[in-house]
Amino acid sequence: MTIHIGAKKGEIAETILLPGDPLRARFLAEKYLDDYFCYNEVRGMYGYTGYYKGKKISVQGTGMGMPSIGIYSYELIVDYGVKNLIRIGSCGSFQADVKVRDVILAMSASTNSNFASQYGLPGTFAPTASYELLEKAKRTADQKKIPVVIGNILSSDIFYDADPNVWKKWAALGVLGVEMEAAALYMNAAKLGANALAILTVSDSLVDHTMTTSEEREKTLTDMMEIALELA
Ligand code: HPA
């Protein structure tokens, strides 16, 4: 057991899916996994292990923001030996041609967070997805005929920004959209020797202010989960 995860050694699979919302972890386990059990209830941050098409896989809520996913991903890698960490989340679009319901594979994650300062680098680190996971996710999406957009996203520490137009500066550099976790996940994976990828569905657009309905959210959520599950 760690400070934040109540699982025993061996109860967590080498590949784990990481939704921000712990109830999505439960939804995924109930809908897709065989012979699953709940290994964590600490702080209501549910974690489950089961089998998908015969392969062992886990799913764990991470909470919102880089401090929270930073804690869970660290303990999963260091204390439980997890090798492949796949965030499944939502994001806001920065680009007119990235629409609500689109699925993004985050090749890289820019950030306004100070997370990388712990490494004492003489420059700026570029948090990057595992090419192996990225390539496999793209191939799976193609097979399932789910269109995906691949590129750079922003992991922001701020949801309610004091400057409502600051996102346009990131958009001008081609950043696809904004969420709040991937950069810390990518940095922990890089530092600790694991593979990471963030798969995101676009839930809202900062460009045209559209939002997905709850029905659409459920459909796109399952598209994203079905891509992620194949990475086990
Ligand atoms: N900002 C930050 N995180 C998000 C957003 C957003 O607009 N939409 C979904 N996750």
Image: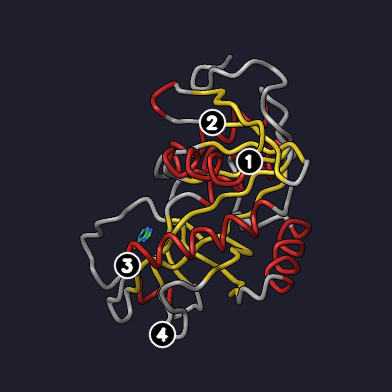
Q: Compared to 147, does 54 lie above or below?
A: above
Tell me the distance, in whole angstroms, between the alpha carbons under discs 4 and 3. Answer: 19 Å
Tell me the distance, in whole angstroms, between the alpha carbons under discs 1 and 2. Answer: 12 Å
SS state under label 4: loop
Q: Is mark 2 within 8 Å of ligand 1?
A: no
| Upstream in sequence: badge 4 or badge 3 | 4
Tell me the distance, in whole angstroms, between the alpha carbons under discs 4 and 1. Answer: 36 Å
Q: Compared to 13, does 9 lie above or below?
A: above
Tell me the distance, in whole angstroms, between the alpha carbons under discs 1 and 3. Answer: 26 Å
| Upstream in sequence: badge 3 or badge 2 | 2
Q: Disc 1 marks which residue? A: 33
SS state under label 3: loop
Residue at 59% from the left image edge and 63% from the top image edge: 106
Residue nearest the viewer, comparing 160 with 84: 84
Does residue 124 appear in the picture of this structure? no
Q: Is mark 3 within 8 Å of ligand 1?
A: no
Q: Which mark is residue 47?
A: 2
Q: Which mark is residue 56?
A: none
Q: Which mark is residue 96?
A: 4
Q: Disc 3 marks which residue? A: 213
- Asked if the residue under mark 2 is in contact with the one under mark 1, i.e. CB atoms within 8 Å, the reply is no
> Mark 1: few, some, or many residues within 10 Å (few <14, many ≥20)?
many
SS state under label 1: loop
Q: Nearer the viewer, mark 4 or mark 3?
A: 3
Residue nearest the viewer, comparing 221 with 154: 221
Q: Quadrant of ligand 1?
A: bottom left
Question: In the picture provided, is 118 more to the left or to the right than 43?
Answer: right
| Upstream in sequence: badge 4 or badge 2 | 2
Question: In the picture provided, is 43 more to the left or to the right than 28?
Answer: left
